[in-house]
């Protein structure tokens, strides 16, 4: 039993054993703002003039077991020098949290002073990006060569983009490495071998920027020969000339070895060069119609005509010697087509 005597708390015990007294003196003590003491559920009024007895700063026991408590307890008297007495507001002001602190995740759209978790921030950003069809890189898509479509695009929403990793075709459109595919329509279904021509209309294909790419006019006549426009080597224009506008040159071992296809391609003014041991001899197509043609060769002394009969795929050679320059009769006989 515990009693108060002369402002002292005295622990009555029948044991003189020090350890036994220590165990019997275990108690729960609270101090009120007025300085009173609540000991094991009972309230005691503070001493007016407390007297501290004992050798240790925090030891208020007398040898007979009685205890004198200070009127105004201090941190030192209670052994709490390392404890700071602060309010909750003070303790949380400018708090520097360490580790991985957590907090409840607010509902999407919350706009208060509530703490925003990383999950809340990500959900808000994703919602904004989806609402504005912002580009979202989804990975790579390889071109293919299967059937008429090559490879097929997956299901996608507006803004989803893919980089072409291999050349080929995607949804029937030709693509090269580095090109970019961007979906333009939400809820675009995956392409199949049946709908790929329709699905490609929901996608944009952006060609990569290639150094040295040559550009030309918006239009040109079919078959026109291309000319460089300027000195950059990157711009071309139409020459307004076709290959057929120029004389063709063929080199053969013998004029009579020309094939029917070569004879068909030749036109008046074209040149056939025959190479032999004596050198090169140029035969000019001097006449041509639906039935055949004549090729004529002339040098200082001779004039030779080789006639081609298309119907029989046969050649006839006429060789004349011009004794006198200006012998028109000889020249006319040589050039006559019969």
Image (spheres, grey):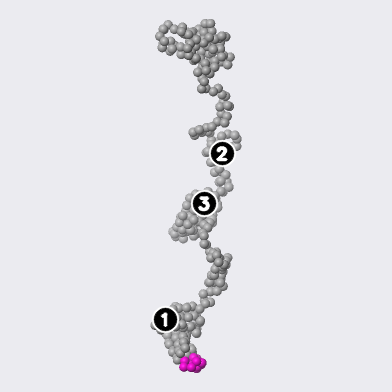
Which label's residue is closer to the chain start, 3 or 1?
A: 3
What residue is at 46 percent from the left and 93 percent from the top? Answer: 323
In the rendered view, tell whether residue 27 sits above or below residue 314: above
Q: 281 or 59: which is nearer to us? A: 59
Which label's residue is closer to the chain start, 3 or 2?
A: 2
Q: Secondary structure at mark 1?
A: strand
Instruction: Tell me the residue that label 3 is attached to.
Output: 161
Marks 3 and 2, Cα distance to the nearest angstrom?
26 Å
In the rendered view, tell whether residue 64 sits above or below residue 176: above
In the rendered structure, does residue 116 fall within the stretch colored magenta? no
Q: In the rendered image, is residue 231 in sight?
A: yes
User: Mark 1 packing: few (<14 Cα in 10 Å), some, or many (20+)?
Assistant: some
- Farthest residue, direction front: 55
Q: Secondary structure at mark 3?
A: strand
Which label's residue is closer to the chain start, 1 or 2?
A: 2
User: Mark 3 packing: few (<14 Cα in 10 Å), some, or many (20+)?
Assistant: many
Query: Residue 282 location in percent, x, y?
Result: 46, 82
Query: Residue 284 location in percent, x, y?
Result: 48, 83
Query: Residue 254 location in percent, x, y?
Result: 41, 82
The span picked out in magenta is 322-332
Which of the two discs, 3 and 2, sits closer to the camera? 3
| Quarter where residue 123 is shown | top right
- The answer to whether mark 1 and mark 2 are in CB contact below 8 A is no
Using the image, tell me which numbered label, if any, was put on residue 108: 2
Query: Residue 194 location in percent, x, y?
Result: 48, 57
Which of the two discs, 1 and 2, sits closer to the camera? 1
What residue is at 51 percent from the left and 74 percent from the top? Answer: 243
Marks 3 and 1, Cα distance to the nearest angstrom?
62 Å
Using the image, tell me which numbered label, if any, was put on residue 275: 1
Using the image, tell me which numbered label, if any, was put on residue 134: none
What residue is at 58 percent from the left and 39 percent from the top? Answer: 109
In the rendered structure, does residue 324 fall within the stretch colored magenta? yes
């Amino acid at each position: 039993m515990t009693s108060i005597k002369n402002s002292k708390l005295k622990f009555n015990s029948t044991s003189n054993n020090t350890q036994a007294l220590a165990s019997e003196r275990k108690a729960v003590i609270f101090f009120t703002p007025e300085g009173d003491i609540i000991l094991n559920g009972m309230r005691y009024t503070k001493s007016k003039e407390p007297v501290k007895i004992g050798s240790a700063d925090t030891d208020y026991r007398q040898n007979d077991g009685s205890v004198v408590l200070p009127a105004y307890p201090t941190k030192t008297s209670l052994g709490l020098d390392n404890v700071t007495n602060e309010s909750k507001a003070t303790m949380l002001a400018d708090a520097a949290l360490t580790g991985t602190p957590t907090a409840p995740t607010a509902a999407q759209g919350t706009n208060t002073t509530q703490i925003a978790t990383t999950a809340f921030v990500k959900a808000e950003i994703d919602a904004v990006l989806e609402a504005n069809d912002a580009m979202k890189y989804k990975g790579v898509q390889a071109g293919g060569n299967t059937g008429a479509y090559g490879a097929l695009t997956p299901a996608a929403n507006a803004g989803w983009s893919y980089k072409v990793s291999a050349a080929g075709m995607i949804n029937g459109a030709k693509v090269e490495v580095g090109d970019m595919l961007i979906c333009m329509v939400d809820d675009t279904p995956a392409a199949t071998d049946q709908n790929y021509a329709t699905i490609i209309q929901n996608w944009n294909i952006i060609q990569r920027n290639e150094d040295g790419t040559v550009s030309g006019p918006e239009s040109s006549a079919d078959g026109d020969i291309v000319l460089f426009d300027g000195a950059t080597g990157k711009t071309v224009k139409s020459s307004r000339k076709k290959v057929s506008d120029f004389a063709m040159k063929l080199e053969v071992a013998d004029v009579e070895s020309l094939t029917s296809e070569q004879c068909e391609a030749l036109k008046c003014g074209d040149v056939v060069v025959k190479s032999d041991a004596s050198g090169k001899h140029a035969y000019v197509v001097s006449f041509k119609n639906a039935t055949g043609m004549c090729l004529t060769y002339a040098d200082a002394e001779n004039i030779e005509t080789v006639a081609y009969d298309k119907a029989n795929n046969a050649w006839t050679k006429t060789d004349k010697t011009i004794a006198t320059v200006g012998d028109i009769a000889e020249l006319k006989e040589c050039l006559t087509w019969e």
